[in-house]
Image (cartoon, helix red, strand yellow):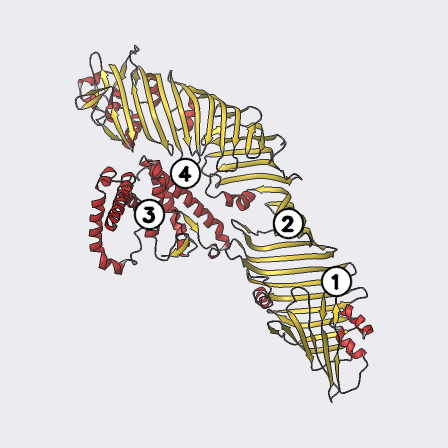
Amino acid sequence: MRLIQARIVPCGLGVLLFLLLASKVWGSPGLHLDTGPLEGPGWSAAGARIALQFTASGGTRASGRLFGLKLPALLEKIRAIEFSCAELDLSDGYSCPAAKFKLHRSDGAWSPPPLAIRFDADNGLHIRGLALAGGKLELDYLPGSKGWQANLQANGVVLSKLGRWLAEWGIEATPEVSAGKISGNLKLEMRAKGLQGELSLGLGNLAYSSDDGERAGENLDVNLRLRARELKDGWQLAGEAGLDAGVMGVAPVWVEVGDAPLSLQFEADWQAQSHTLDLRKLHIQHPGVGALRTRASLVNGGWILHEAELEQGHFPELYQVYLQPFLYGTPLAELYTAGELEARLRRDGNGETHAQLELRRLDLHDEQQRFGLEQLSGSLHWGSAGKVPTSTLSWGGGHLYRAPLGPASLRGEFKGEDFQLAEPLQVQILDGPLRISEFKAQGLGTPSLAWELSGGLGPLSMARVSEVLDWPPFEGSLAGEIPAIRYARGVMNVEGSLGIQVFDGDVVIRELRLEEPLGVVPRLRAEVDFHNLSLDALTRVFSFGTIRGRLDGALHGLLLEDWQPRAFDATFSTPPGDRSRHRISQRAVGNLSSLGGGPADILSRSFLRFFEDFSYQRLGLSCRLRQGLCEMGGVEDSSGGYYLVKGGGIPRIDVKGFNRRVDWNTLVERLKQATASQGPVVK
Amino acid sequence: MKKLLCNSWMLIFLSACVTINVYFPAAAAEKAADRIIEDVWGGGEDKRAPADKGALYQPQSGGVLGQVVEFFIPSAAAAAPNLDISSPAIARIQGTMRKRHGQLAPHYAAGSIGLSSNGELAVRDLKSIALRSRSQVARLVADENRDRGALYREIARANGHPEWEAEIRATFARRWVAKARRGWWYQNRGRWQQK
């Protein structure tokens, strides 16, 4: 018996038939055989009982039972296997065209439809016609001198049915799969060095989803090849996968497979004792978007990324597929992008992370046209700690709202969440320079982003400034030293003041504050003072009708919401003690009158129409804007109203306003009409 | 003793009522919220829902409630009669939300998204959204929430009380739910419920 068993061990279950016949009990009408304990690599059985009956017609009927089974993982529930064959054919090896099997589990039994089985000592075991989960399976088992080979071929197995079948065996392998068919081949080879296997699978129309829908795929066509080789302590794994069609992803990123398939290659080692998966290589190619190479480990269920490299990152696809979903609801959610990007991330032995971004001619344009940068190129280096190389970045141009930005290049250092400019930077804005002598940012990539800048602006020509603001063309210039611009919690505060030399006078802007510059409702606050402006120059630009003289003014508590005036306290008036020549033209008088609600042609009805202009003592206008209403005033109150122009000399003309509360939009409309019209017709 | 205790509780309750109304015009905020919600969602609330109960209770309860409210908050109403929702910024945000609602409505109806208890939108059932539409829905929800946040902030600011933002948000959170169509989902103490 011992001798016989030695042959059984390498051959496994199929050899039982051989055993039966080798015992030379041929010719008797019936036969029963009981074996002692049996064992093979990875399995054992308490024993086997085999019975043969020889029918009168010369056929052979066989049945048997293998019991007290201990099988490896996944098959461990099988306690016993029964088989029977009505027509055992012994002419060429041993074959049975319709063998019946019954697998006894600890909690029930399963019988596949009858199988075709053929066996001989040299060619091993071949099983055909195994139907499972809507598909067909074929099994070939070949014994060899130093091991064995097995091949399992599956065709058209329906995954949802397979999932249900496996669940009966206590294997929750595919709970997320709702559709898909699988065909493929599993080849196992046992050699002296250990087991090795190769799996090739084709999955068609695969659909899966996690319970919460965070991971899902639909209509996927997948090709998969996996190779595994047993090592002393674990497994060596490698494989490729190709995704030919469908859509899949992990929220919020959903990837639709385009014309070119996505592909993946990996190599890994599994160490059983330390429970470590060392992913030596993972290479993912998304044609037209980018290619990613990574190296990582899975230690105790947690992933550690050692290295990642993005090659040929291509915009706009990279932005649209992988970046934009994380930016929804932020100012960076709506960008037109173009260009290329490469990135490298590396973690060294000390746990420090270094990242490098190579930008190649990247264009970023906000869809709402608030900002844009073109031809961004450079190397950005980032490190969690330690020494970080200096980053360089340059661009070919851009714009901030409607103000064009010139080309520039900068050098700076990123470390942790901080960035600092390494050397001063100068950027052309409109037709003048913006000089940034220092720039520091903290909390990059976090909600607590804050930055601070110091430098200077200008001189910019007011002609260009007024052009981008859609104002009539001014003469003059804008300049300022900026001790600091500080940004924190969505608010940008400008310290210091900006001076504008315009209309032969000065405008000073102080306490400039910009809230949520890229938010839903940007808000600008400022205090503006006007000194000694030439009314002559001013009225010429606005074609309001000529006024000669000087003007002081204040625009305090200015608040722009959405770039529209929401509140301010404005007063404009002739400076006290002003000795310049004070004249006001007929047309200007008419326009002023219409601002206050009177008729614009008021003068043409009287003898005053014969005078081109008039002398005045003082003029002025005030408006306190709140909630869309402008509370108006002039240089001086009069009975029931206020003086906008207090006349002097002969003929004396006063312009009085009576309307104290004016709708702001109406006032703006009137101003527009006044500056657009040719003025009252003098007859 | 029991009566005294009861009375003192009443006092605390009353003073609490008054305090709230002095600082935050709750009734006016509710009215303002309703006006905006009706504009954004189009039309009034679901007319089928209260039909039966309304016939029984509405005339009486309206009258009684009205009196009670007036009795408690005469000064508050006088101090802050209305919430200003007419600023151009509010109008613009409201317009954007109105336009977006056309795209959001089918997802409300399908139960894919719902009203969260903080006055925002949330994806309730990701699985019910076709994979190819998920990015679009995520974007709509993020944009809507950005606009809702801005809307609450702008209303508080337009009325000169930026500190009211949280209360305005809470008021809207209640009113979105109250005005939701039948079948839509909303969060109640962290759990989803269907209206």
Are tags 2 and 1 found on a single chain? yes
Is label 1 in contact with label 3 (beta carbons under 8 Å)? no
Identify which amino acid the numbered label 2 is placed on: Val
- Protein chain holding label 2: A
Q: Please, which residue is most extreme toward the front here? A: B1
Say which chain tag 3 marks: B
In the picture, residue A49 is in which quadrant? bottom right
Q: Amino acid at mark 4?
A: Val
Across and down, in percent, residue A534 comes to 34, 16
Tell me if A52 is positioned left or right of B10 in this view. Answer: right
Q: Horizontal and vertical percent for residue A489?
A: 45, 34
Question: Compared with residue B88, is residue A635 higher up or lower down, i.e. above or below?
Answer: above
Do marks 3 and 2 share a subunit?
no
User: Label 3: few (<14), some or many (≥20) within 10 Å?
Assistant: many
Using the numbered discs, state the Cα–Cα distance from disc 3 to disc 4 in whole angstroms.
Answer: 19 Å
Where residue A560 appears, x then y in whole percent? 36, 31
Q: Is residue A302 left or right of residue A629?
A: right
CA distance separating discs 1 and 4: 64 Å
Q: Which residue is mark 4?
A: A520
Image quarter in which the C terminus of chain A is found: top left
Dot in front, 1 or 3: 1
| Quarter of the rendering occupied by the N terminus of chain A | bottom right
Residue found 41% across the figure and 57% down from its top = B110
Circle 2 residues within 10 Å: few <14, some 14–19, many ≥20: few
Q: Nearer the viewer, mark 1 or mark 4?
A: 1
Q: Nearer the viewer, mark 2 or mark 1?
A: 2
Residue to which mark 1 is pinned: A189
Residue at 50% across, 55% down: A212
Q: Secondary structure at mark 3?
A: helix
Q: Are marks 1 and 4 on the same chain?
A: yes
The chain that hosts pointer 4 is A
